Image (cartoon, rainbow, N blue to C red):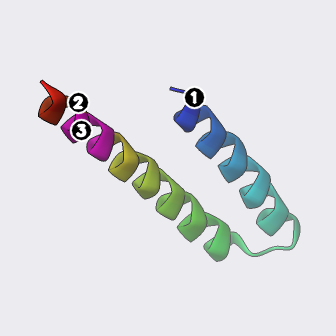
Amino acid sequence: MLTYLIFFITNFVVAYFYIDYGDYVKAFWLSVYLVTMVFVVDLIKHYMKKRKQ
């Protein structure tokens, strides 16, 4: 849960920074990348939990 919070805060800060300079496309792709990374990290954690059992 904390990882999600950190990723979303980072996402908003960086997206705001890019939008401030008018680079919407870069901001969009960065958010897509960050969401994908969160998903991948979550999947890895899920599989690690399954392995321990």
Q: Looking at the picture, how far across and down is residue 37, in whole percent?
A: 44, 56
Return the residue found at the far front.
52
Q: Looking at the picture, how far across and down is residue 48, in whole percent?
A: 24, 38
Looking at marks 2 and 1 on the same chain, the residue that comes earlier in the sequence is marked by 1
Q: According to the image, label 1 marks what residue?
A: 2
Q: Residue at x 28, y 44 (%)?
A: 43
Q: Are marks 2 and 3 in contact (CB under 8 Å)?
A: yes
Label 1 amino acid?
A: Leu
Q: According to the image, label 3 marks what residue?
A: 48
Image position of 14 (left or right of 40):
right
Would you say residue 45 sits in the magenta stretch?
Answer: yes
The secondary structure type at the circle numbered 1 is helix
Q: Nearer the viewer, mark 1 or mark 3?
A: 3
- Crowd around label 1: few <14 · some 14–19 · many ≥20 (10 Å): few
Image position of 41 (left or right of 17):
left
Separation of residues labelled 1 and 3 (CA atoms): 18 Å
First to last magenta residue range: 43-48
Q: According to the image, label 2 marks what residue?
A: 49
Name the disc covering residue 30, or none.
Answer: none
**Observer-nearest of 19 and 37:** 37
Q: Looking at the picture, how far across and down is residue 17, in whole percent?
A: 83, 62
